[in-house]
Image (cartoon, coloured by chain):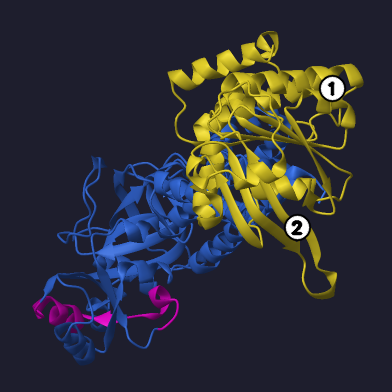
Amino acid sequence: MFLALRDLRFARGRFALMGAVVALIAVLGVLLSGLASGLADAGISGLRALPMTHMAFDEKATGEQFSRSTVERADWQAWAKAPGVERAEPFGNTLVNAQVTEGAEKGEQVNLAVFGMEPDSSLAPEPIEGERISEDGAGIVITREIADLGVEIGDVLTVDKSEVPLTVVGLVDDTVSYGHIGVAYADLDTWRHVHYGLPGELPEAARGQATAVALTLQDGAGTPAVAAVEKATGTRADTKEATFGASPGYTAESSTMALIKGFLYAISALVVGAFFTVWTVQRKAEIALLKALGAPTGYILRDALAQVVAVLVGATALGTAVGLALGSAMIGKAPFSLSAPAIATSSGLLIGLGTVGAAVAVRRITAVDPLTALGATR
Amino acid sequence: MTTPSTAAGHRAAPDAADAADAPETADSGGLRLLDVTLTLGDGDTAVTALDHVELAVAPGEFTAVVGPSGSGKSSLLAVAGGLQRPTSGTVRVAGTELTALSDKERTAARRRHIGFVFQQSNLLASLTVREQLLLPAHIDGRLDAAARARADELIEAVGLAHRAGSRPHQLSGGERQRAGLARALMTSPAVLLVDEPTSALDRVRSAEAVRLLAEQTHERGTATVMVTHDTAIMDAADRVYEMVDGRLS
């Protein structure tokens, strides 16, 4: 770094310009990561919060499983008995529009992602206020997302068209949503009323149905035992992560974000590569001199790469700091959340790919002939 | 007959033939070129840059090589300094046979045994005078207190103490040349190779620069070869060769 640091200081104007480009890209990287995790939270945080490793759907439902799949009581019973299955619990999922019919915000329209579950199952949430969901009565536990609309414990929400009444009995203080809609937890029968749009008595056929079976498998899917249950019940076990793709809009959102970020990193690597190409060509005479003085090529390459890494790390750190400051101001105003691993990955990729771009550029150091230090008089 | 072990300050000028006949066992110091030929290009366009050159420079001896441009002076420096491998012949520096080394070993030999003073001094733009001198020590992995002391001593010796913290663009041509000389002496080289030291200087400064070169050569016992087309500065040299069409005489 003997020469690299002094060159940085000497040509600070040029390096500052290039560093500014990298820093701005780092800012964008943080904001995009925040937006991506914010969108992901809005899309699938409800599913992520469920304690399970897999979910078994009707095998005929291959896309948008949550709205297409129906499983029967026999299915989750078969899953529960299979070897290697720790837990198998029925799970219902329905998106509905409702209206506050009793409460301070009377008349307010509320969208609900109703998650149905047995009140004593591991899927049922522990509210921080009020009571858990129960078998008797159409009680729901709401999440922060819905409470933020002004809905309180004791309010009654009525589902549009079917007129199924839902009484708010509890609150969990997490922002948990599914498909950009706040989650409301209900017991399975209440969910069935909502799902089938039937307020009165449930028909016998509906009493044994759910959307899917939430599974906790000991050694993962794909084992013969799991395959046998899948075959017997006509269901298919997807991993928890695979179920995220079944959430409306999730795949499109995350692939769009990934595409934008990919382009950003590629542009950054090219800018850094182009800068160091010009820089190295400008330094050709000095490199020839260094070689004539007896500096091994490795010494010059190490020096140049140390400079590249110093510039990239400095600029990325600065940009990330600015991005974090801007990002924390956005929380609450947009689907935005800052996750340390996502930001670390983004910064790491920026530095890593920039280094690759610059490494290609400084490679031409090896081709410089020390003889040129003697001048053109040959 | 003068052997290369002759002490610094030696001024006699034995003729080239004598030098060529010097016993090889006494080559522990200085520079020795034995029957060196360098052909550039090939086929019809081949040019003989060095034609069976014999040269012996003892430690502490200041040799000047004059000749018009294109006579092979720079090729002589390139070959003597291990920047270029001759087509045939042997180059020996401080007892090491340069022509027998690998590229990597030659780079190391250049670092340890050879000092270059380039045309227009060729300093690094971002370094101060003092840092120009510390750089060779850093490259060699020996940037210690001794190196720093030596750098200060050399800066003092070439009269740049007041300029130690200046960068090249703040220096005059003569100061740059002196900084370049101090840098070349940093590693206590056995051989000092000087390329057109006065090309950027006026007459008075040229004389000064060459006087300093002679003084340092004698004081530090380097085997110095200076190539130039400026015949006015030859007086300071202990010995003068003329180069014409790759032949030394």
| Tag 2 subunit | B
Which quadrant holds residue A121?
Answer: bottom left
Give me the residue at 45% from left, 34% from top. B141
Chain B drawn in what color? yellow
Q: Nearer the viewer, residue B42 or A208?
A: B42
Name the amino acid type tagged 1: Ser
- Which quarter shows the N terminus of chain B? top right
Q: Which residues are magenta?
A: A62-83
Name the amino acid type tagged 2: Asp
Q: Can residue B24 be seen from the camera position used here? A: yes
Q: Please tell me whether residue A123 belongs to the stretch shown in magenta.
A: no
| Tag 1 subunit | B
Against A119, residue A3 (above or below) is above
Which quadrant holds residue B209?
Answer: top right
Chain A drawn in what color? blue
Which quadrant holds residue A190?
Answer: bottom left
Q: Which mark is residue B51?
A: 2
Left or right, A276 with respect to A218, comes to right
C-alpha gap between disc 2 and disc 1:
30 Å
